[in-house]
Image (cartoon, coloured by chain):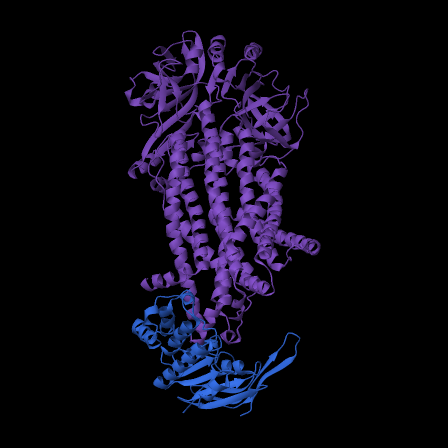
Amino acid sequence: MNQLIVEWKKFWRLAEMRLLFLALLVAVVAVTSVGFFTDRADRAMSQQATTMLGGDMVVVSTRPISDTFLQEAEKRGLRTAETISFPSMVSVGEKFQLAQIKAVSVEYPLHGNIETSESALGEVENTLLKRLEKDEVLAESRLFVALNIKAGQEVQLGQSKVRLAKLIRKMPDQSASIFQLAPKLILPMHQLKATGLLTPASRARYSQLFAGDEKNIKQFTNWLKPQLKKTEAIRTLEDGLPSVQQALQRGQRFLKMASLLAVILAGAGIALSSYSLTQHETPAVAVLKTMGASRRQILFRYLSQLFFSATIAALVGAILGYIIQLFLASYLQDFVGQTLPSASWWPVVVGLFTAWIMVLGFSVPHLMRLINTSPVQILQGQSSQPKTSLFFSAFVLSAAVLLLMWMQTQDIKLSGILLIAVLVAIAVFWLMATLMLRVIRKLGERWRLPKANKRMALMVVVFGIGLFSLLLLTTLRGDLINRWQASLPVSAPNHFLINIQPDEVEPLQKLLSKDKIETPLYPMVLGRLVKINDKAVSEDDYETDRAKRLLIREFNMSANVAMPEGNKIVSGDWFKPEALNGLSVEEGIAKTLRLKMGDSMTFDIAGEQITEKIISLRSVNWDSMRPNFFVMMAPKAFDDQPKTFITSIHLDDDQKHVLPSLIKEFPSVTDIDITAIMTQVRDLINKAAFAVQAIFLFTLVAGVVVLFAALQSQKAMRRKEIAILKSLGASRAYLRRSLVLEFAMIGGLAGFLASVLALIAGNVAASMLFDLSPEINLMLITTGTLLGAVLVGAAGYLNVRGLLSVVPVSLFR
Amino acid sequence: MNVIETKNLGKRLSTSSNEELLILDNINLHIAQGESVAITGESGSGKTTLLGLLAGLDIPTKGEASLLGKALSPLDEDERAALRLGKVGFVFQSFHLMDNLNALENIMLPLELDKGSSDIRQRALDALKQVGLEKRSTHLPTQLSGGEQQRVALARAFVSKPQILFADEPTGNLDRNTGEEIIALLFDMQKQSDTTLVMVTHDDSLAMRCQTHYKLVDGQIVT
């Protein structure tokens, strides 16, 4: 170890080695800071999702679940709770209302709280079930409205009389029930038996909830999975907060792409600096060989140094990454509204492997050439390296890039596509650069421009790819986030109104239009899918949990003349205004249930079976905050069906008065305020944008490293050239002009190519990854070209400025 | 005992246009332990190629060369390197010091390559003292003059007490006075350690100071 450090100090004196280390450091900082940050954010979101779920893991079934799961869980030190849900009538005197009864054990919920109040607008407090009196139950405000009672009044539930103690304002698992028509009533489990409601024939849904530490839950889930009956399924965190999670996943994808660009760019820096390093070390290796060093000794000498550098870069980088992540996380913390879980060690491992893979992949091809240096060349005054096969270099490089991409995306297909994209980009850059330089060469003779040569083509490719990453990120960050935010405008709906009766539709619309609120109202009918293509279906016909759930649950179906905003037809045609038949199905659910155009679906709607054929498939923007439906029927299909209506509206702060008058006039209509969720989603997008901006800095630093590495690799050659030109009588002014012009030309060309390609790639990414429509931004091309010319012109000149004072006599040494 | 021997040694090169170029032909040499030998010739006469073949840096296309009693042709590159390790030293026209290593570290290098070496630092310091640069031990090559760099190179060549020292135009990059100082030091050290010296030079006066003088003309020895 001591020896390694001593040797490292010696290598550190080489500018190439310092550049290589810097490139490694940038890559590791980018990877680890994003890694720590996404790791913590991921776990915070999982925690939030568990709150929505009521536990870390839930087993659901349409039949009673045996106690063995509970016993085993308790044996393993997990906390448990049970719920049984079923519909039942609740009555007060002559008034009857269907309610969704949820009988729960006192431990419920394992995560999160049941928030209650004395009245609809009263103060909110947490309620513990064990604190309830023995006949007290909780219910959603809709039940109070429907029965026209106040908190504390008695109602009939089956054979029992229970007291509706408080109104439920918020509770776990509410998201799944937002559109369920029947209001929820929470009944402590010990009161269930007395109601006499639960019989073997009841259409009940049984759940067992489990909570504990991550490892324990995982082990328990693994133990449990093989024992599940066909009627039993595991509910995971994906059911938690779909829109918030989607936004978070987008943010993370952004961050990871940004860090990946920094890594690849740093890779170019490593490749260039290790090229200069081996170029510089060629005579040294020849000398070592004359002294009797074997190839193995030489390989060990350089490889051990490279790996040692990579390890130090990884450790220092991880520390820096951790510190940067702390800033990002403290920013994130206040809006997640909970303590972020601590970071895991995993990003350090990823950082270490990133550094090692980069050193191996980007410098080993050069190293192989170096160790094969012939010793005799030291006598002949040459300094050339033997060639290695291009195939070998390309293979090692591609493998390294693929591995790095996979480590970031954990998606081999996506990594493959990205790798091909990078290779195509290099090929395109090379081709375009060569072509354009040829044109410049022709023009250059007339205008006395610097001679275009192969070295310039290489520089254009290197700078071009660097600038490409920077510009791509800029477009992604600015353009894409702007458009993405625009897809969720400030005027996005923030209230859902549900349970609107058919005769209330017109007066309600009138009331809303007084405040200039125009919104479509969608009829909503519940139906259970019973047949596909005239064949009975059940949850047993499908393997995925999602498909099983779809068959257990009732579908919220709608019908409308116009297609809901944010929906897009992907196949077939939307309904004609007078149509009575046909179905339009959301493409995701069609895939889950293996449905295709022309298939027939039979729904049981209030006891009546209705069969229709699929005439169109739609894509749906689920985070549009508008009513969205998996299945829509023809505009006239529900004319004769019993139904309620649903809509979403946007209320500004100065329109808040609408709500009280609305509830007063339409007491059965239920308002669901989604402002909180909306704020959360928008906040997330903003924070993600900020985070990407922070990561953007790494790419910038990586770009600068590449720039200097490229310049360093040509310094020796340039020194000689300048000496020759001076000996021929070139003045400093002439040399300065031609150097600046050459670098500006390289930069401008690279910038032009980079911005054109970034524009294309940005749009492809926008439509593929983020479902946004393409946009052409000509400013980007102008900016890119100018930026390239100025940046490379200035940096290039500053880097070689010192060479202008080279004295021609150095040629004779 | 001869430490270097050649028998009908020849080297041909094929050019890019597939023409055969005869660089050396029919070289027969016998160099004894402790002997000093000069190889002179015009530019392009093949003297540097011959030095490379004698040291086992390159292999002949004809004939055989042996170093320290071992034929070189059957050996691969690493085996030839192993043969040189600790027994052969080099001094080059352009010094070829590692520019990231200071004077002392440059001298330590051949000892570090040889796993059997001990007291590496002390031996390198002694060698540095021998060339009169003990006060410059921490200086990097760029901080040393040409003459000082060649002194360090001499110390590096002699530090492992080699049996043979190959020198390729050791004064080629130095002014006359400095060159003479270096040559004086070189012969001094060679005599002290009874090292065989094989020196390539175009300077006849320098060649005269060696015990044996071979002259190369068009790839063949004429004296």
Q: Colour of chain B?
A: blue
Residue A697 seen? yes
Percent across and percent down for residue B6 are 50, 89
Q: Residue at x 35, y 72 (%)?
A: B133
Q: Indicate left or right for A222 with A742 as reference.
A: left
Where is residue B198 shown, x and y percent of the image?
A: 45, 84
Q: Does A270 sit above or below residue B121? A: above
Q: Seen in the image, is B203 located left or right of residue B82?
A: right
> To which quarter of the image does residue B101 belong?
bottom left
Q: Nearer the viewer, residue A364 or A8?
A: A8
The residue drawn where x is 44% and y is 53% is A22
Residue at left offset 44%, top offset 49%:
A26
Return the x and y of residue A413 as percentages of the image width and height.
Answer: 54, 48
In the image, residue A237 above or below residue A658: below
Kindly indicate which chain is depicted in purple in the rendered structure: A
When asked about the image quadrant of residue A146, the answer is top left
Foreground pick, A107 / A476: A476
